[in-house]
């Protein structure tokens, strides 16, 4: 049985050290599609690594983007919010850090990546990050957002999107304002993007997070999580086989 390995990828950006995590099956020698994963607001964490390992086991090389810096590892919601908000309010900076991690995914030497088959996915804040990377014009075949916010300061940037977009949304999510959904649809349609938005009845925020347990606000939903991951893998199979 294959064993997924997780290794650190350390690099510099603007004089600051970042430490992303690379997940891959070390027994597989040939090049595989590369996925950049943007974690939730807690950043690099054991939970993020578990998700990356489960996705890597499907035949991918997955890099978890360190968006905060090597010395910033939030331990609670207050610390996570303090680390996240400067990036949410400065999408240019957010995109710069996603792009730096994206380049590391392609340049690292631990696992062979097929650079013609690249995609990004993310969770909550990370879903926003995945969409922003796509809006920046990065050469991704797909961008997938799990229970992420959909707003962006410049909707015209959607014309830069090169691949398909999949949004996996909890229909009862109180943390993603409902007005963001029609605005996102209009943004994607105006740019002619190949997009899907799947809305899961009864699901709230963080439905993929086994540790989420705030009823009515942030709750794990095993059935919805399973359906959402199947939808992501179906899209990746489609875009990587085209």
Image: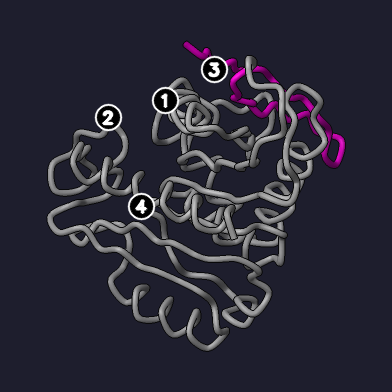
Which tag, 4 or 1, sits closer to the chain's start? 1
In the drawing, does residue 55 fall left or right of residue 27? Answer: left
- The residue wearing badge 4 is 231
Count the labels in the image: 4
- The residue wearing badge 2 is 210
Disc number placed over residue 167 in the picture, else none: none
Q: Secondary structure at mark 2?
A: loop
- Residue at 45% x, 56% y is 235
Q: Secondary structure at mark 1?
A: helix
Q: Is residue 199 magenta?
A: no
In the drawing, does residue 38 fall left or right of residue 157? Answer: left
Give me the C-alpha separation between circle 4 and circle 3. 22 Å
**What's the colour scheme?**
one colour
Give me the C-alpha separation between circle 3 and circle 1. 15 Å
Which tag, 4 or 2, sits closer to the chain's start? 2
Give me the C-alpha separation between circle 4 and circle 1. 21 Å
- The residue wearing badge 1 is 47
> With respect to residue 167, does 65 lie above or below?
above
Give me the C-alpha separation between circle 3 and circle 2. 20 Å
- The residue wearing badge 3 is 4
Q: Secondary structure at mark 4?
A: helix
Mark 3 vs mark 2: in front:
3
Give me the C-alpha separation between circle 2 and circle 1. 9 Å
């Amino acid at each position: 049985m294959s064993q997924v390995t997780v290794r650190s990828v350390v690099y510099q950006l603007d004089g600051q050290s970042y430490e992303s995590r690379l997940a891959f099956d070390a027994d597989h020698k040939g090049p595989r599609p590369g996925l950049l994963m943007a974690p939730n607001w807690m950043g690099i964490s054991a939970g993020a690594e578990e998700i990356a390992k489960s996705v890597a086991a499907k035949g991918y090389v997955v890099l978890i983007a360190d968006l905060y810096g090597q010395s910033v590892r939030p331990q609670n919601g207050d610390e996570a919010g303090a680390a996240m908000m400067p990036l949410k309010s400065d999408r240019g900076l957010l995109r710069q850090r996603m792009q730096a991690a994206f380049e590391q995914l392609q340049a690292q030497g631990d696992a062979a990546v097929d650079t013609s088959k690249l995609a990004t996915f993310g969770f909550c804040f990370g879903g926003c990050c995945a969409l922003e990377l796509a809006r920046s014009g990065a050469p991704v075949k797909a961008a997938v957002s799990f229970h992420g916010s959909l707003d962006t300061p410049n909707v015209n940037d959607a014309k830069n999107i090169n691949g398909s977009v999949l949004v996996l949304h909890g229909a009862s999510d109180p943390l993603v304002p409902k007005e963001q959904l029609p605005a996102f649809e209009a943004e994607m349609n105006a740019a002619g993007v190949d997009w899907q938005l799947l809305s899961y009845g009864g699901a709230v925020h963080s439905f993929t997070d086994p540790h989420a347990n705030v009823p009515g606000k942030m709750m794990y939903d095993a059935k919805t999580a399973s359906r959402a991951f199947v939808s992501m893998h179906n899209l990746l199979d489609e875009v990587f086989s085209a």
